[in-house]
Image (spheres, rainbow, N blue to C red):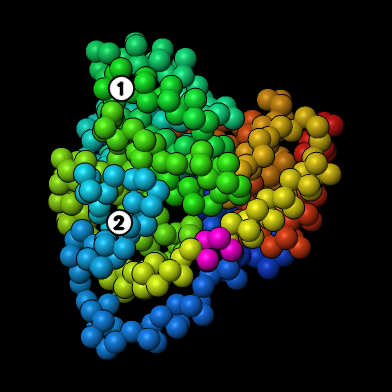
Amino acid sequence: MIRFSNNVSLLRTSEIRDLMSLATRPDMISFAGGMPGNELFPTEEVDEIYNSLPLDLKRTAFQYGPTPGFPPLLGVLKEFLRAKGLPVDTNELLITTGSLQAINILAKVFIDPGDVVVTENPCFIGAISAFQSFQGHLHGIDIDADGVLLDPLKAFLAQSREKAPKFFYSTPNFHNPAGILYSEERKNGLIEVLKEHQLPLIEDDAYGDLYFDEGAARTARPMKATYDQELPICYTGSFSKILGPGFRLGWMLAPREVYEKCELIKQSDDACSPTFTQVLAYEFVRSGRIHPYVAKMRGIYKRRKDTMVAAIHRYFPEEIKWVEPRGGFYMWCACPPELDLMAVLRASIEKGAVFVIGKTFDPKGTDNSHFRLAYSHTPEDKLERGIQIIGEALKDALRK
């Protein structure tokens, strides 16, 4: 008889993954997947980089590499992060197979079965799955337009002193799925609460480079850059949103005592991340190509966001509320609690548009009053029609 582990029994499928098969239909307008459009990838630049590599470096790219990462990539990535104010000289940097691996490794480092983990609600589905896979008990704290709500966080931590949570997980910059940017005041307040309770922070910053204005750029300064001396902060980032998900490259910047455990875990997980794409990413960063490319992507995503916002104003019923994002990939829409969102989703799919329902991002899996729209993957000429389809389905459901 097959007997599965308790870890596996706690996993739940991601509705995003389930819906991705629909996104491949040629007639489907997808707002489901949080990914760049295929037409945006720097294919010509990468062709040029590979063709210009010396033979010995091409051969190196096909080989296993050191567990911490391809040393030249670690070097240029440190300078990339230093420019954001991150403390690369007093912390250790680890290249990971996407930032989700970094989150999984940190989960394995911190979580024993039954441990409590505090997250935002809503929360990145990959983090939810990672924490649950190690039998962590998730407690989500609601957020608003400025970040996590501090009073409920304080109340929960005060009542949890006998069995303190292991860490707080946050996506403060252009949140997935909520699209919000933490205010400076909320960041300051959060750090004070975490310091009082000696609670480490996992800061997930996959979208921080994709700001839409200079004010947002300043506000999106990583918390680790400001508060590193005040609190243990494990900072994760990714090339997936600023270069390409297929590179499967992310990173973790962590205090040495945490890093040492993480390197051992990565060694047993996959030995090393792909050397081939690390070589390409190194050349992309070293040559300076990354800066104009990311700037170009900011402009494209901002236009797509603006197109979506205009269409929402035009087609959505007034009962639907949202916060306009200042960067990143996502719009987060709030609905009246009596609305049957599953019926809206089914009707939208039938007419050719797909999105993701809020319970996917709820640590308890129960939220049916929100949905996420990703504008990053969808060309502007399709955005308006897709929003019109969803708007009509919303209006039909509200009339029933």
Dividing the picture into quarters, in which one does residue 48 lie?
A: bottom left
At a point 36% along the width and 69% down the height, the residue shown is: 286
Query: Which label was assigned to residue 195?
Result: 1
Element assignment for label 1 = helix
At a point 43% along the width and 22% down the height, the residue shown is: 189
Q: Specify few, some or many for label 1: CA neighbours under 10 Å numbering under 14, 14-19, or 20 or more.
A: some
At a point 25% along the width and 54% down the height, the residue shown is: 94
Tell me which label, 2 or 1, sits earlier in the chain: 2
Place of residue 319 in the rendered image (x, y in percent of width and height, measured from the top left): 77, 29
Q: Which residues are magenta?
A: 292-296
Place of residue 383 in the rendered image (x, y in percent of width and height, measured from the top left): 73, 56
Query: Which label was assigned to residue 54?
Result: none
279 relative position to 240: left or right: left
How far apart in space, not on screen, are marks 2 and 1 (Cα)? 27 Å
> Does the rendering let one see residue 373?
yes
Please, what is the dominant secondary structure of the magenta stretch? helix
Element assignment for label 2 = helix
Disc 2: which residue = 78
> Does the rendering let one see residue 274?
no
381 relative position to 56: left or right: right
Dividing the picture into quarters, in which one does residue 103 lie?
A: top left
355 relative position to 184: left or right: right
Dividing the picture into quarters, in which one does residue 111 lie?
A: top left
Pick whichever, 60 or 385, lies toward us. Answer: 60
